[in-house]
């Protein structure tokens, strides 16, 4: 596990890449007001807000499985990459008829 003093942008990039790989995740979401993001030089990492005390990840998932199961699976997979911060998963939308990522579990 990386330390909480690690660059938030690097943590956000790593979490975003990992989150996109879950089979039920269609895409990351910055939320209705675009607040789920981490600033990085030259832009931002959308869908992942790395804060001093926690991390929030916004996801759009495909329809089919219980949302609580999907969120728990994503959380378990991301916690080791969050630098000791608690990870909160925000399901921003659910879509039907869309393929998922390449992973088979978290």
Image (cartoon, rainbow, N blue to C red):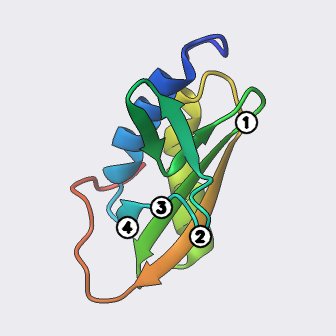
- Mark 3: which secondary structure? loop
Proximity of marks 1 and 2: CB atoms separated by less than 8 Å? no
Nearer mark to the viewer, of 4 and 2: 2
The answer to whether 55 is drawn above or below residue 99 in the figure is above
Q: Is residue 74 left or right of residue 17?
A: right
Instruction: Mark 4: give few (<14), some (14-19) or many (20+) Cα within 10 Å.
Output: many
Q: Is residue 44 left or right of residue 102?
A: right
Distance CA(mark 1)–CA(mark 2): 20 Å
Residue found at x 56% / y 58%: 34
Note whether residue 64 is visible. no
Proximity of marks 3 and 4: CB atoms separated by less than 8 Å? no
Residue that carries the numbered disc 2 in the rendered image: 32
Proximity of marks 4 and 2: CB atoms separated by less than 8 Å? no
Nearer mark to the viewer, of 3 and 2: 2
Instruction: Mark 2: give few (<14), some (14-19) or many (20+) Cα within 10 Å.
Output: few
Residue 91: name its quadrant: bottom right
């Amino acid at each position: 596990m990386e330390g909480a003093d690690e660059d938030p942008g690097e943590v956000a990039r790593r979490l975003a890449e990992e989150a996109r790989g879950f089979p039920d995740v269609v895409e990351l979401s910055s939320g209705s007001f675009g607040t789920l993001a981490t600033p990085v030089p030259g832009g931002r990492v959308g869908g992942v807000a790395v804060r001093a005390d926690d991390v929030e990840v916004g996801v759009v998932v495909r329809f089919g499985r219980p949302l609580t199961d999907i969120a728990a699976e994503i959380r378990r997979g991301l916690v080791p990459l969050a630098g000791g911060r608690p990870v909160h998963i925000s399901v921003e939308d659910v879509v039907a008829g869309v393929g998922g990522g390449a992973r088979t579990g978290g």
